[in-house]
Image (cartoon, rainbow, N blue to C red):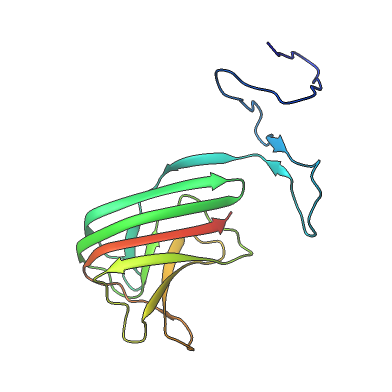
């Protein structure tokens, strides 16, 4: 059994935990990869966070948030270091919100210096007159996902909140 009390020790060769978990007992500590060569612009080689969980996605409108009658409302996330991947599955039979469509309730606020986008799939949803494709978008320092409709060779436009949607899926990876 390997057990060190007090000062750290150095071990050579692979180490195996036969039963149980490797527990990091101090916040901000983790697995240090500093022995690997660094890429230009590297800011950290410490993997110091991992988390999985659920969140409650809520469809809203930008003019008035409104309330939805949901038939599906599922959200999951995984956070590794400073990257969070969220997925949601929504369906609603009625909604009172107006304005452009967004999903609120992200588990973490996004980084204030980088925007992120993701993938969307929707059944029986009105994207608006000027859109044939849909993309998810997390803005700077935000805890919402907004949606942009796109046409070939044109600027993206915000998508209106639809009053009823059969199936809506979105996945976004964003930095925090």
Is residue 143 among the parts visible in the rendering?
A: no
Q: Quadrant of residue 145?
A: bottom left
x and y, in percent, of residue 12 in the image:
80, 24
Is residue 131 among the parts visible in the rendering?
A: yes
Which residue, as the protein is rendered here, is positioned at the far top? 1
Query: Is 13 in front, or is 41?
Result: 13
22 left or right of 31?
left
Q: Vertically, is 98 above or below 143?
A: below
x and y, in percent, of residue 115 in the image:
57, 67
Q: Vertically, is 130 above or below 120?
A: below
Which residue, as the protein is rendered here, is positioned at the far front? 13
x and y, in percent, of residue 18 in the image:
58, 18
48 left or right of 84?
right
6 left or right of 145?
right
Q: Quadrant of the C terminus?
A: bottom right
Residue at 53% x, 51% y is: 84
x and y, in percent, of residue 58 in the image:
33, 57
Residue at 41% x, 54% y is: 87
Which residue, as the protein is rendered here, is positioned at the far left? 93
Which residue, as the protein is rendered here, is positioned at the far bottom? 153
Residue at 81% x, 22% y is: 10
Q: Quadrant of the N terminus?
A: top right
Q: Quadrant of residue 129?
A: bottom left
7 left or right of 171?
right
Count of marks placed on residues = 0
């Amino acid at each position: 059994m390997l057990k060190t009390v007090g000062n750290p020790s150095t071990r050579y060769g692979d180490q195996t935990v036969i039963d149980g978990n490797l527990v990091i007992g101090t916040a901000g500590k983790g697995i240090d990869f500093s022995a690997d060569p660094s890429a230009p612009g590297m800011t950290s080689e410490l993997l110091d966070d991992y988390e999985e969980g659920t969140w409650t996605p809520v469809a809203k409108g930008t003019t008035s948030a409104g309330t939805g009658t949901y038939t599906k409302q599922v959200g999951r996330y995984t956070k590794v270091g400073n990257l969070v991947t969220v997925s949601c599955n929504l369906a609603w039979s009625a909604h009172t919100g107006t304005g452009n469509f967004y999903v609120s309730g992200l588990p973490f606020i996004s980084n204030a210096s980088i925007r992120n986008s993701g993938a969307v799939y929707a059944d029986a949803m009105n994207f608006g007159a000027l859109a044939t494709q849909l993309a998810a978008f997390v803005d700077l320092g935000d805890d919402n996902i907004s949606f942009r409709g796109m046409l070939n060779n044109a600027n993206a436009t915000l998508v209106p909140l639809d009053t009823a949607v059969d199936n809506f899926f979105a996945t976004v990876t964003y930095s925090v």
